[in-house]
Image: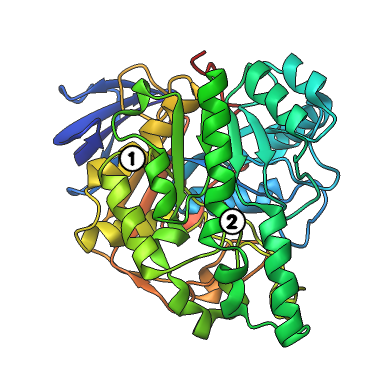
Amino acid sequence: MRRMLVDGRIVNEGRIVETDLLIDGDRIARIGGPVPPDAEVVELGGRYVLPGLIDDQVHFREPGAPAKGTIESESRAAIAGGVTSFLDMPNNSPPAVTRAAVAEKRAVAARTSYANYGFYLGATNDNLEELKRATPADACGIKVFMGASTGNMLVDDPRTLEGIFSEAALPVAVHCESTPMILDAERRYRERYGDAVPIAAHPEIRSAEACYASSSVAVALAKRHGTRLHVLHLTTARELELFDSGPIDKKRITAEVCVHHLWFDQGRYADLGAKIKCNPAIKTAEDREALLRAVVEDRIDVIATDHAPHTAEEKARGYFDAPSGLPLVQHSLAMLLELHRQGRLSLPTLVEKAAHNPARLFGIAERGFIREGYFADLVVVDLGRTSRVTPESLLYRCGWSPLEGTTFHSAVHTTWLNGRPVYADGRVIGPPSGRALELAPAP
Protein backbone atom coordinates (compact mmCIF):
# COMPACT_ATOMS: atom_id res chain seq x y z
CA MET A 1 0.00 0.00 0.00
CA ARG A 2 1.22 3.50 -0.86
CA ARG A 3 0.43 6.48 1.33
CA MET A 4 1.46 10.11 0.84
CA LEU A 5 1.84 12.11 4.05
CA VAL A 6 1.29 15.71 2.97
CA ASP A 7 1.81 19.10 4.63
CA GLY A 8 4.20 17.91 7.32
CA ARG A 9 7.29 19.44 8.89
CA ILE A 10 10.01 16.81 8.85
CA VAL A 11 12.60 17.02 11.64
CA ASN A 12 15.64 15.07 10.51
CA GLU A 13 19.45 15.29 10.45
CA GLY A 14 19.68 18.79 11.83
CA ARG A 15 16.96 20.37 9.70
CA ILE A 16 13.22 21.08 9.73
CA VAL A 17 11.76 20.90 6.23
CA GLU A 18 8.16 21.44 5.13
CA THR A 19 7.54 18.67 2.63
CA ASP A 20 5.58 15.53 1.83
CA LEU A 21 6.55 11.92 2.42
CA LEU A 22 5.66 8.87 0.33
CA ILE A 23 5.44 5.51 2.13
CA ASP A 24 5.40 2.40 -0.03
CA GLY A 25 4.86 -0.81 1.90
CA ASP A 26 7.13 -0.71 4.95
CA ARG A 27 9.59 1.85 3.53
CA ILE A 28 10.00 5.55 2.92
CA ALA A 29 9.88 5.64 -0.88
CA ARG A 30 10.36 9.35 -1.48
CA ILE A 31 10.74 12.64 0.36
CA GLY A 32 8.94 15.38 -1.55
CA GLY A 33 7.64 15.19 -5.09
CA PRO A 34 4.12 14.87 -6.51
CA VAL A 35 1.39 12.68 -5.08
CA PRO A 36 1.16 9.41 -7.05
CA PRO A 37 -2.34 8.77 -8.41
CA ASP A 38 -2.56 5.42 -6.60
CA ALA A 39 -1.48 6.75 -3.18
CA GLU A 40 -3.79 7.35 -0.24
CA VAL A 41 -3.33 10.95 0.91
CA VAL A 42 -2.82 11.51 4.65
CA GLU A 43 -3.15 15.18 5.58
CA LEU A 44 -0.85 16.24 8.46
CA GLY A 45 -1.96 19.84 8.75
CA GLY A 46 1.52 21.24 9.40
CA ARG A 47 2.30 18.84 12.22
CA TYR A 48 5.87 17.75 12.90
CA VAL A 49 7.15 14.40 11.66
CA LEU A 50 10.01 12.82 13.62
CA PRO A 51 11.79 9.51 13.24
CA GLY A 52 10.34 7.08 15.75
CA LEU A 53 12.35 7.22 18.96
CA ILE A 54 14.79 4.42 19.76
CA ASP A 55 14.99 3.82 23.51
CA ASP A 56 18.32 2.15 24.24
CA GLN A 57 17.51 1.26 27.85
CA VAL A 58 14.28 -0.33 29.03
CA HIS A 59 13.33 -3.03 31.53
CA PHE A 60 10.13 -4.62 30.25
CA ARG A 61 10.15 -7.23 33.05
CA GLU A 62 9.65 -10.34 30.92
CA PRO A 63 10.40 -13.00 31.95
CA GLY A 64 9.83 -12.98 35.66
CA ALA A 65 7.57 -10.11 36.75
CA PRO A 66 4.31 -10.01 34.75
CA ALA A 67 2.55 -7.92 37.41
CA LYS A 68 5.00 -5.12 36.66
CA GLY A 69 5.13 -5.42 32.89
CA THR A 70 5.53 -7.63 29.87
CA ILE A 71 7.02 -7.09 26.45
CA GLU A 72 3.46 -6.82 25.13
CA SER A 73 2.17 -4.32 27.69
CA GLU A 74 5.18 -2.04 27.79
CA SER A 75 5.71 -2.00 24.02
CA ARG A 76 2.07 -0.87 23.64
CA ALA A 77 2.88 2.02 25.96
CA ALA A 78 6.02 2.72 23.92
CA ILE A 79 4.27 3.19 20.59
CA ALA A 80 1.63 5.36 22.27
CA GLY A 81 4.52 7.63 23.23
CA GLY A 82 6.25 7.64 19.84
CA VAL A 83 8.94 5.09 20.76
CA THR A 84 9.10 2.65 17.84
CA SER A 85 12.17 0.60 18.86
CA PHE A 86 13.61 -0.48 22.18
CA LEU A 87 16.64 -2.27 23.59
CA ASP A 88 15.71 -4.33 26.64
CA MET A 89 17.96 -5.02 29.62
CA PRO A 90 18.91 -8.50 30.91
CA ASN A 91 18.18 -8.30 34.65
CA ASN A 92 15.11 -10.50 34.45
CA SER A 93 14.20 -13.53 36.51
CA PRO A 94 15.99 -15.62 35.41
CA PRO A 95 18.57 -13.15 34.07
CA ALA A 96 19.43 -13.14 30.37
CA VAL A 97 23.11 -14.04 30.77
CA THR A 98 23.32 -16.64 28.00
CA ARG A 99 22.71 -16.32 24.29
CA ALA A 100 19.98 -18.94 24.62
CA ALA A 101 18.15 -16.85 27.23
CA VAL A 102 18.30 -13.78 24.98
CA ALA A 103 16.97 -15.87 22.10
CA GLU A 104 14.00 -16.89 24.26
CA LYS A 105 13.17 -13.24 24.92
CA ARG A 106 13.46 -12.50 21.21
CA ALA A 107 11.02 -15.30 20.44
CA VAL A 108 8.48 -13.83 22.87
CA ALA A 109 8.91 -10.39 21.30
CA ALA A 110 8.36 -11.82 17.82
CA ARG A 111 4.87 -12.87 18.96
CA THR A 112 3.90 -10.03 21.27
CA SER A 113 5.87 -6.79 20.73
CA TYR A 114 4.12 -3.72 19.37
CA ALA A 115 7.48 -2.03 18.74
CA ASN A 116 10.73 -3.13 17.11
CA TYR A 117 13.08 -4.83 19.54
CA GLY A 118 16.61 -5.75 20.53
CA PHE A 119 18.07 -7.26 23.69
CA TYR A 120 21.24 -6.98 25.77
CA LEU A 121 23.25 -9.96 26.99
CA GLY A 122 24.01 -9.63 30.69
CA ALA A 123 27.49 -9.96 32.20
CA THR A 124 28.24 -11.83 35.42
CA ASN A 125 31.46 -12.61 37.24
CA ASP A 126 31.61 -16.02 35.54
CA ASN A 127 30.18 -15.87 31.99
CA LEU A 128 33.08 -14.23 30.15
CA GLU A 129 33.35 -17.04 27.61
CA GLU A 130 29.69 -16.64 26.69
CA LEU A 131 30.16 -12.89 26.26
CA LYS A 132 33.16 -13.41 23.98
CA ARG A 133 31.11 -15.66 21.69
CA ALA A 134 28.25 -13.16 21.31
CA THR A 135 27.69 -11.44 17.96
CA PRO A 136 25.20 -8.77 16.78
CA ALA A 137 22.92 -11.63 15.76
CA ASP A 138 22.70 -12.55 19.47
CA ALA A 139 22.44 -9.19 21.23
CA CYS A 140 22.70 -5.43 20.79
CA GLY A 141 25.37 -5.14 23.46
CA ILE A 142 26.73 -6.43 26.75
CA LYS A 143 25.24 -4.97 29.90
CA VAL A 144 27.60 -4.71 32.87
CA PHE A 145 26.31 -3.72 36.31
CA MET A 146 29.40 -2.19 37.89
CA GLY A 147 27.13 -1.23 40.77
CA ALA A 148 24.44 -3.39 42.35
CA SER A 149 20.93 -2.40 41.29
CA THR A 150 17.68 -4.28 40.63
CA GLY A 151 18.58 -7.95 40.27
CA ASN A 152 21.71 -9.83 41.28
CA MET A 153 24.15 -9.20 38.43
CA LEU A 154 26.93 -7.18 40.04
CA VAL A 155 30.24 -7.60 38.22
CA ASP A 156 32.99 -6.69 40.67
CA ASP A 157 35.78 -9.17 39.84
CA PRO A 158 38.65 -7.07 38.38
CA ARG A 159 39.78 -9.97 36.19
CA THR A 160 36.31 -10.34 34.71
CA LEU A 161 36.07 -6.61 34.03
CA GLU A 162 39.47 -6.65 32.32
CA GLY A 163 38.34 -9.59 30.20
CA ILE A 164 35.06 -7.94 29.19
CA PHE A 165 36.66 -4.63 28.30
CA SER A 166 39.52 -6.23 26.40
CA GLU A 167 37.69 -9.00 24.51
CA ALA A 168 34.02 -8.11 24.02
CA ALA A 169 33.04 -7.84 20.36
CA LEU A 170 29.82 -5.97 21.15
CA PRO A 171 29.34 -2.50 22.66
CA VAL A 172 29.70 -2.58 26.45
CA ALA A 173 26.98 -0.67 28.28
CA VAL A 174 27.61 -0.03 31.96
CA HIS A 175 25.68 0.92 35.07
CA CYS A 176 28.23 2.80 37.17
CA GLU A 177 27.94 3.09 40.95
CA SER A 178 30.39 1.98 43.64
CA THR A 179 28.68 -0.73 45.66
CA PRO A 180 31.13 -0.57 48.62
CA MET A 181 30.50 3.19 48.94
CA ILE A 182 26.73 2.65 48.76
CA LEU A 183 26.80 -0.10 51.39
CA ASP A 184 28.87 2.08 53.71
CA ALA A 185 26.39 4.96 53.30
CA GLU A 186 23.46 2.61 53.97
CA ARG A 187 25.13 1.45 57.18
CA ARG A 188 25.60 5.02 58.37
CA TYR A 189 21.99 5.97 57.62
CA ARG A 190 20.69 2.84 59.35
CA GLU A 191 22.67 3.78 62.44
CA ARG A 192 20.94 7.16 62.42
CA TYR A 193 17.39 6.26 61.34
CA GLY A 194 17.04 2.49 61.73
CA ASP A 195 14.70 1.19 59.05
CA ALA A 196 12.95 4.59 58.77
CA VAL A 197 15.51 6.17 56.43
CA PRO A 198 13.78 8.99 54.51
CA ILE A 199 13.47 8.64 50.75
CA ALA A 200 15.12 12.05 50.42
CA ALA A 201 18.38 10.41 51.57
CA HIS A 202 18.56 8.35 48.38
CA PRO A 203 20.87 10.76 46.50
CA GLU A 204 23.16 10.89 49.52
CA ILE A 205 23.31 7.11 49.84
CA ARG A 206 23.76 6.58 46.10
CA SER A 207 25.91 9.66 45.94
CA ALA A 208 27.67 11.62 43.25
CA GLU A 209 30.94 10.31 44.65
CA ALA A 210 29.77 6.71 44.29
CA CYS A 211 28.83 7.37 40.66
CA TYR A 212 32.12 9.05 39.78
CA ALA A 213 34.21 6.39 41.51
CA SER A 214 32.70 3.74 39.25
CA SER A 215 32.32 5.63 35.97
CA SER A 216 35.92 6.83 36.11
CA VAL A 217 37.05 3.19 36.40
CA ALA A 218 34.91 2.21 33.41
CA VAL A 219 36.26 5.02 31.26
CA ALA A 220 39.86 4.21 32.25
CA LEU A 221 39.33 0.54 31.35
CA ALA A 222 37.82 1.48 27.99
CA LYS A 223 40.68 3.83 27.16
CA ARG A 224 43.23 1.17 28.06
CA HIS A 225 41.60 -1.51 25.93
CA GLY A 226 40.00 0.54 23.16
CA THR A 227 36.54 -0.69 24.19
CA ARG A 228 33.36 0.54 22.55
CA LEU A 229 31.91 1.81 25.85
CA HIS A 230 28.49 3.32 26.50
CA VAL A 231 27.97 4.73 30.01
CA LEU A 232 24.30 4.64 30.91
CA HIS A 233 22.16 7.13 32.85
CA LEU A 234 24.62 9.82 33.94
CA THR A 235 23.30 11.80 36.91
CA THR A 236 26.07 14.15 38.04
CA ALA A 237 27.88 17.24 36.85
CA ARG A 238 31.22 15.82 37.93
CA GLU A 239 31.01 12.74 35.71
CA LEU A 240 30.70 14.94 32.63
CA GLU A 241 34.43 15.70 32.76
CA LEU A 242 35.05 12.09 31.72
CA PHE A 243 33.43 12.56 28.31
CA ASP A 244 34.37 14.53 25.21
CA SER A 245 32.14 16.84 23.23
CA GLY A 246 31.59 16.18 19.56
CA PRO A 247 29.71 13.98 17.10
CA ILE A 248 29.04 10.41 18.13
CA ASP A 249 30.68 8.85 15.07
CA LYS A 250 34.06 10.13 16.25
CA LYS A 251 33.79 8.55 19.71
CA ARG A 252 34.65 5.18 21.22
CA ILE A 253 33.26 6.24 24.60
CA THR A 254 29.72 7.60 24.73
CA ALA A 255 27.29 8.74 27.40
CA GLU A 256 23.55 8.53 27.97
CA VAL A 257 21.17 10.54 30.12
CA CYS A 258 17.63 9.54 31.01
CA VAL A 259 14.61 11.79 30.74
CA HIS A 260 13.81 11.71 34.45
CA HIS A 261 17.25 13.09 35.29
CA LEU A 262 16.54 15.98 32.91
CA TRP A 263 13.07 16.50 34.37
CA PHE A 264 13.21 15.98 38.14
CA ASP A 265 15.66 17.06 40.82
CA GLN A 266 15.95 15.99 44.45
CA GLY A 267 13.44 18.61 45.58
CA ARG A 268 10.68 16.33 44.24
CA TYR A 269 11.32 13.59 46.80
CA ALA A 270 9.21 15.68 49.18
CA ASP A 271 6.02 15.14 47.18
CA LEU A 272 6.76 12.08 45.05
CA GLY A 273 8.79 9.99 47.48
CA ALA A 274 9.68 6.51 46.26
CA LYS A 275 7.82 7.10 42.99
CA ILE A 276 11.04 8.74 41.76
CA LYS A 277 13.43 6.41 43.59
CA CYS A 278 15.76 5.04 40.92
CA ASN A 279 19.35 3.93 40.49
CA PRO A 280 21.41 6.02 39.99
CA ALA A 281 19.47 8.51 42.06
CA ILE A 282 17.91 11.76 40.92
CA LYS A 283 20.24 14.37 42.35
CA THR A 284 20.55 18.16 42.68
CA ALA A 285 19.07 20.93 40.56
CA GLU A 286 22.65 21.89 39.67
CA ASP A 287 23.30 18.36 38.39
CA ARG A 288 20.13 18.52 36.32
CA GLU A 289 21.18 21.81 34.75
CA ALA A 290 24.64 20.45 33.96
CA LEU A 291 23.13 17.41 32.26
CA LEU A 292 20.87 19.58 30.10
CA ARG A 293 23.84 21.69 29.03
CA ALA A 294 25.85 18.56 28.25
CA VAL A 295 23.14 17.32 25.90
CA VAL A 296 23.27 20.57 23.93
CA GLU A 297 27.08 20.59 23.96
CA ASP A 298 27.23 17.03 22.55
CA ARG A 299 29.02 15.74 25.62
CA ILE A 300 26.01 13.48 26.21
CA ASP A 301 25.12 11.48 23.12
CA VAL A 302 21.87 9.61 23.84
CA ILE A 303 18.63 10.26 25.72
CA ALA A 304 16.70 7.21 26.96
CA THR A 305 14.25 6.27 29.71
CA ASP A 306 15.57 3.35 31.80
CA HIS A 307 11.85 2.47 31.89
CA ALA A 308 11.57 0.23 34.96
CA PRO A 309 8.05 -0.38 36.28
CA HIS A 310 7.19 -1.69 39.73
CA THR A 311 3.79 -2.11 41.32
CA ALA A 312 2.24 0.73 43.30
CA GLU A 313 2.16 -1.53 46.36
CA GLU A 314 5.92 -2.08 46.17
CA LYS A 315 6.57 1.63 45.76
CA ALA A 316 4.53 2.40 48.88
CA ARG A 317 7.02 0.57 51.11
CA GLY A 318 9.76 2.12 53.23
CA TYR A 319 13.14 3.21 51.89
CA PHE A 320 14.99 -0.12 51.96
CA ASP A 321 12.02 -2.13 50.68
CA ALA A 322 10.70 0.16 47.94
CA PRO A 323 12.37 -0.93 44.68
CA SER A 324 14.14 1.52 42.39
CA GLY A 325 12.81 2.38 38.96
CA LEU A 326 9.91 4.24 37.34
CA PRO A 327 7.75 3.84 34.22
CA LEU A 328 8.45 6.43 31.52
CA VAL A 329 8.42 5.02 27.99
CA GLN A 330 4.91 6.32 27.20
CA HIS A 331 5.91 9.88 28.13
CA SER A 332 9.57 10.36 27.26
CA LEU A 333 8.82 12.19 24.00
CA ALA A 334 6.26 14.41 25.73
CA MET A 335 8.85 15.31 28.39
CA LEU A 336 11.44 16.15 25.73
CA LEU A 337 8.94 18.23 23.77
CA GLU A 338 8.14 20.14 26.95
CA LEU A 339 11.86 20.85 27.41
CA HIS A 340 11.84 22.08 23.80
CA ARG A 341 8.93 24.40 24.61
CA GLN A 342 10.95 25.76 27.54
CA GLY A 343 13.82 26.58 25.16
CA ARG A 344 16.14 23.92 26.56
CA LEU A 345 16.31 21.57 23.55
CA SER A 346 15.85 22.20 19.85
CA LEU A 347 13.76 19.72 17.90
CA PRO A 348 16.78 18.61 15.81
CA THR A 349 18.78 18.00 19.01
CA LEU A 350 15.93 15.98 20.50
CA VAL A 351 15.78 13.83 17.36
CA GLU A 352 19.54 13.39 17.23
CA LYS A 353 19.81 12.18 20.83
CA ALA A 354 16.68 10.01 20.94
CA ALA A 355 16.61 8.54 17.41
CA HIS A 356 19.68 9.18 15.23
CA ASN A 357 22.39 8.49 17.80
CA PRO A 358 20.99 5.24 19.23
CA ALA A 359 20.81 3.95 15.65
CA ARG A 360 24.40 5.01 15.00
CA LEU A 361 25.74 3.66 18.27
CA PHE A 362 24.24 0.18 17.98
CA GLY A 363 24.40 -0.06 14.18
CA ILE A 364 20.62 -0.35 13.83
CA ALA A 365 20.06 -0.88 10.14
CA GLU A 366 17.80 1.48 8.19
CA ARG A 367 16.02 2.99 11.18
CA GLY A 368 16.35 6.11 13.30
CA PHE A 369 16.33 8.51 10.34
CA ILE A 370 13.85 9.78 7.77
CA ARG A 371 15.66 8.69 4.62
CA GLU A 372 14.51 7.28 1.31
CA GLY A 373 14.74 3.49 1.44
CA TYR A 374 14.64 3.36 5.25
CA PHE A 375 11.85 1.72 7.23
CA ALA A 376 8.92 4.06 7.81
CA ASP A 377 9.12 4.30 11.62
CA LEU A 378 7.68 7.75 12.32
CA VAL A 379 5.91 9.77 14.97
CA VAL A 380 3.68 12.71 14.06
CA VAL A 381 3.37 15.19 16.92
CA ASP A 382 1.00 18.06 17.46
CA LEU A 383 2.60 20.98 19.26
CA GLY A 384 -0.67 22.90 19.27
CA ARG A 385 -2.53 20.43 21.45
CA THR A 386 -2.25 19.57 25.13
CA SER A 387 -2.34 16.15 26.74
CA ARG A 388 -2.78 15.34 30.41
CA VAL A 389 -1.39 12.32 32.23
CA THR A 390 -4.25 10.59 34.03
CA PRO A 391 -4.55 7.08 35.46
CA GLU A 392 -7.02 6.28 32.66
CA SER A 393 -4.52 7.29 29.97
CA LEU A 394 -1.74 4.99 31.18
CA LEU A 395 -0.87 1.85 29.24
CA TYR A 396 1.79 0.64 31.66
CA ARG A 397 0.94 -2.70 33.29
CA CYS A 398 1.86 -1.23 36.69
CA GLY A 399 -0.91 1.37 36.30
CA TRP A 400 0.79 4.43 37.71
CA SER A 401 3.20 7.22 36.71
CA PRO A 402 5.17 9.87 38.62
CA LEU A 403 3.84 12.30 36.01
CA GLU A 404 0.15 11.89 36.88
CA GLY A 405 -1.54 15.29 36.83
CA THR A 406 1.04 16.77 34.44
CA THR A 407 -0.27 18.64 31.40
CA PHE A 408 2.02 18.53 28.38
CA HIS A 409 1.79 21.11 25.62
CA SER A 410 2.03 18.45 22.91
CA ALA A 411 0.39 15.22 21.88
CA VAL A 412 1.31 12.21 19.76
CA HIS A 413 -0.97 12.40 16.74
CA THR A 414 0.12 9.19 14.98
CA THR A 415 2.85 6.59 15.36
CA TRP A 416 3.90 4.69 12.25
CA LEU A 417 5.76 1.37 12.45
CA ASN A 418 7.16 -0.42 9.44
CA GLY A 419 4.99 1.64 7.12
CA ARG A 420 1.63 1.51 8.84
CA PRO A 421 -0.12 3.51 11.56
CA VAL A 422 -0.08 1.64 14.86
CA TYR A 423 -1.30 4.43 17.16
CA ALA A 424 -3.79 7.16 16.28
CA ASP A 425 -6.69 9.02 17.86
CA GLY A 426 -5.50 8.00 21.30
CA ARG A 427 -5.59 4.26 20.72
CA VAL A 428 -3.35 1.41 19.63
CA ILE A 429 -4.28 -0.01 16.23
CA GLY A 430 -4.06 -3.65 15.25
CA PRO A 431 -2.13 -6.63 16.63
CA PRO A 432 1.57 -6.61 17.61
CA SER A 433 3.76 -6.01 14.56
CA GLY A 434 7.22 -5.20 15.91
CA ARG A 435 10.27 -6.67 14.21
CA ALA A 436 13.71 -7.71 15.38
CA LEU A 437 16.23 -4.92 14.84
CA GLU A 438 19.07 -5.70 12.48
CA LEU A 439 22.29 -4.75 14.24
CA ALA A 440 25.76 -4.08 12.95
CA PRO A 441 27.65 -1.92 15.46
CA ALA A 442 30.90 -0.31 14.36
CA PRO A 443 34.01 -2.26 15.49
Give the percent coordinates (x, y) of residue 397. Answer: 67, 62
Judge whether 297 appears above or below 328 on screen. above
**Residue position marked by numbered label 2 in the rendering:** 210
Give the percent coordinates (x, y) of residue 344. Answer: 23, 57
Q: Nearer the viewer, residue 423 or 335?
A: 335
**Residue position marked by numbered label 1 in the rendering:** 299
- Three-letter residue code for mark 2: Ala
**Residue shown at 61%/27% (left/top)?**
140
* Left or right, 193 with reference to 409: right
- Residue 209 seen from this side: yes
**Residue shown at 26%/20% (left/top)?**
30
Judge whether 206 appears above or below 126 on screen. below
Judge whether 207 appears above or below 152 on screen. below
**Residue shown at 51%/85% (left/top)?**
270
Number of other residues with Cα within 10 Å of mark 1, as a class: few under 14, some 14 to 19, many 20 or more: many
Helix, strand or loop at mark 2: helix
Sequence-first disc among 1 and 2: 2
In space, the residues marked 1 and 2 are separated at their CA atoms by 21 Å
Image quadrant assignment for residue 101? top right
Helix, strand or loop at mark 1: loop
Give the percent coordinates (x, y) of residue 73. Answer: 66, 53
Judge whether 66 appears above or below 137 on screen. below
Give the percent coordinates (x, y) of residue 192. Answer: 71, 85
- Three-letter residue code for mark 1: Arg
